[in-house]
Each structure stands twice: as C-alpha cells, then as structure tokens.
C-alpha cells in the first residue's frame, strides 16, 4: 500500500493500480470512453485526463500507475476544457442524432457530453454514412463509432474470436471484420460481446431496434436456460407487452459478462404459441409408444 493526495485528500492506494483505478476505488469520478475493466487501458480517447504534480501536461489516468506521494487533481478548468474538446471532436466526427438513436439514454458518449455541458458539436466534418446490416443479430453503424477499440479487444482477447480489427488509415480508419468483409459474411459467430462493450450505438442488437429505450425496460436477472455452464444474464423486459427485448451478460462468474449466440439472442421461445403452459400427462402407455 502507498499514499497519494487526490483533490487535496490523502488516500491509500495499492501499488500497481492506475490513477483511474485508485480514483474509482475512492469514489472519485473520472469520465472514460475507451477504458472498460474487461478490455483494459489503451489511452485512446484522452477523456480521463488529470493533472499530476511534477509531470508536464495532462496525463491519461488509465495509463499512469500510482507512485508513493503523488499529488493528483482530477478536476480543474484546464482538465474540463481538455475533456470538452475531446468529446466535442468525437461528436463532430460522427453522425450523432441522439433523438432518433437506439442508445439515447444509455450511451456513454452522450453521458460525457451531458456532464461537460456540450449541447451540440462545434465542428463540422465529413462523416461516413456506412451501415452494415448484413449480420443476423448485430447491426453496425460506422457513423457512430468513436474508434475506442473496446470491441476489438473484446472480440480478440475476451472471447478469442479474432474477427475485428482496425483497418485503413487516418480519416478512413474503421473497425473491420476479417479483411473488411460485411459482418454477415465474416467469421463472426454473433456472440454479441462487441455490442455489450460498445459505448455508443455503433454496434446494436438488431432484434431490439425500435422496441424500447433502456430505461423503459425492466431488468430481470436470471440464469441462461440452455447449457450446463449456467451463465448469468439480465433480461431487459417490456412488461406491458410481456416480451423480452434484449439480453445482456452479467459481470459475475461463471461468464463475466460473456454469452454465446444462443444465450444472448435465442430468447423469443418464451413467447412461442407452441410453448407448453400446462403439464402433459400420458393417460395410456405401453412399451411400444
Ligand atoms: S451514439 Fe450516443 S451520442 Fe451518438 S447519437 Fe447515439 S446516443 Fe447520441
Ligand atoms: S459478435 Fe462476437 S465474434 Fe462477432 S465481432 Fe462481435 S465479439 Fe467478435
Ligand atoms: S464499434 Fe463501438 S466499441 Fe468498437 S471502436 Fe467503435 S465505438 Fe468503440
């Protein structure tokens, strides 16, 4: 253990922790977009900037490890103005029409813009309008991608499916499947891990489109009914229509957020008219039936 000073308060931290982890452990909020505890630190989005005494310029708190005696500020005018610019540029580089967006109300980019008081993007940039509707369960909207890389790490290192990567260069950089194939023609197994990790509406569960915003749906925790692994999941339920709208993996053992294609997308059977609602009792039976 060691001691650092954060926003004027002395706090105990563990050696090897990053400033971001230490701040979160002590209830100090630092906004992030590319960081996710499943996919780790990349320092890509530059939103988690902090001031560290003795270090030049602002530092990305997700990549700087704590050192004994460090003096850190997580809020200041300079930090806020740098964070505002980061979010402004991200919003400006995409097509972020929140009113019509599936993730309105459950989008980390929107949350960051709200927190920083950004009403609309300052800059105008040519942006892609590329949509990939080729896959059975995952809908891709490149215009809402902020290139955080979470989906790529999730696909390659969390679920080890090795489908996604960044392709092309500079302004043309985008997330590609295999050698830039449409997702539906690629080696993607539609596990949906990338959708669960995406902070924006760049990746969406196709089955849930237009069926309700996140906050309108009740969350019901349960165990996947398919195999013996016993994956823990949350059903997002429309009570009025008595329908499951989407399924997400819970971040606990044994699956730590992951689900397979059956668990995540094979949920409509609960409303099948063929489903047994009363027990069947065989009244006559013999060895040959
Ligand atoms: S992805 Fe987020 S910021 Fe972009 S339009 Fe949708 S809700 Fe708004
Ligand atoms: S759905 Fe699964 S396999 Fe397909 S790209 Fe996403 S994480 Fe990779
Ligand atoms: S698709 Fe989503 S998770 Fe992947 S890089 Fe774009 S914003 Fe990040």
Image (spheres, grey):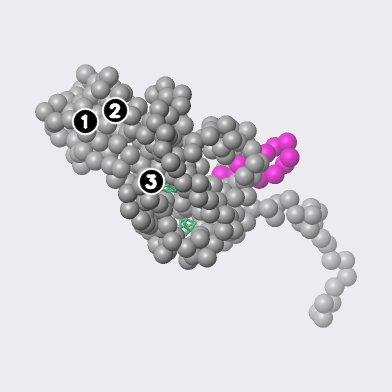
Give me the C-alpha separation between circle 3 and circle 1.
Answer: 21 Å
Instruction: Specify whether residue 159 is in view.
Output: no
153 and 236: which one is in front?
A: 153
Residue drawn at x 42%, y 64% is 178
The quadrant where residue 31 appears = top left
Q: How crowded is mark 2: few (under 14 residues within 10 Å), some or many (20 or more)?
A: some
Numbered disc total: 3
The quadrant where residue 64 appears = top left
Give the mark, 2 or 1, whose residue is nearer the N terminus. Answer: 1
Q: Which mark is residue 58?
A: 1
Position of residue 19 in the picture relative to residue 240 (left or right): left
Q: Residues within 10 Å of mark 3 (few under 14, many from 20)?
A: many
Give the mark, 3 or 1, whose residue is nearer the N terminus. Answer: 1
Q: Measuring from the top left, give residue 231's x and y in whole percent.
A: 52, 53
270 is higher (above) or lower (below) than 186: above
Quarter of the figure with the N terminus: top left
Magenta region includes residue 238: yes
Instruction: Specify whether residue 163 is in view.
Output: yes
Residue drawn at x 59%, y 35% is 100
Of marks 3 and 1, the one in the foreground: 3
Task: Name the residue tied to disc 3.
Answer: 147
Magenta region includes residue 250: no
249 and 135: which one is in front?
A: 135
| Secondary structure found at label 2 | helix
Position of residue 18 in the picture relative to residue 174 (left or right): left
**Magenta residue span:** 234-244
Q: Are marks 2 and 1 in contact (CB under 8 Å)?
A: yes
Mark 3 Cβ and ligand 3 under 8 Å apart: yes
Residue drawn at x 41%, y 38% is 125
Q: Residue 82 carries which label?
A: 2
């Amino acid at each position: 253990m060691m001691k650092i000073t954060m926003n004027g308060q002395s706090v105990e931290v563990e050696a090897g922790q990053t400033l971001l982890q230490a701040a979160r452990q002590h209830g100090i909020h630092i906004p992030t977009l590319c960081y996710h505890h499943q996919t780790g630190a990349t320092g890509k989005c530059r939103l988690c900037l902090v001031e560290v005494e003795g270090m030049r310029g602002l530092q990305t708190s997700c990549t700087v490890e704590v050192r004994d005696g460090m003096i850190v500020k997580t809020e200041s005018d300079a930090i806020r103005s740098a964070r505002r610019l980061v979010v402004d540029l991200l919003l400006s580089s995409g097509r972020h029409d929140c009113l019509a967006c599936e993730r309105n109300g459950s989008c980390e980019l929107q949350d960051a813009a709200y927190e920083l008081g950004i009403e609309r993007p300052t800059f105008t940039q040519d942006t892609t309008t590329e949509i990939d509707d080729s896959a059975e369960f995952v809908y891709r909207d490149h215009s809402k991608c902020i290139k955080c890389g979470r989906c790529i790490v999730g696909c390659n290192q969390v679920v080890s499916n090795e489908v996604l990567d960044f392709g092309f260069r500079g302004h043309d950089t985008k997330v590609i499947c295999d050698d830039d194939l449409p997702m539906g023609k690629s080696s993607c197994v539609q596990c949906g891990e990338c959708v669960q990790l995406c902070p924006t509406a760049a990746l969406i569960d196709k089955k849930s489109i237009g069926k309700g915003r996140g906050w309108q749906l009740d969350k019901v925790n349960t165990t996947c009914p398919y195999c013996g692994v016993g994956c823990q999941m949350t059903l997002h339920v429309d009570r009025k229509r008595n329908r499951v709208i989407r399924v997400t993996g819970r971040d606990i053992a044994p699956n730590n957020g992951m689900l397979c294609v059956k668990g995540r997308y094979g949920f409509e059977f609960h409303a099948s008219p063929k489903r047994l609602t009363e027990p069947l009792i065989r009244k006559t039976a013999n060895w040959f039936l």
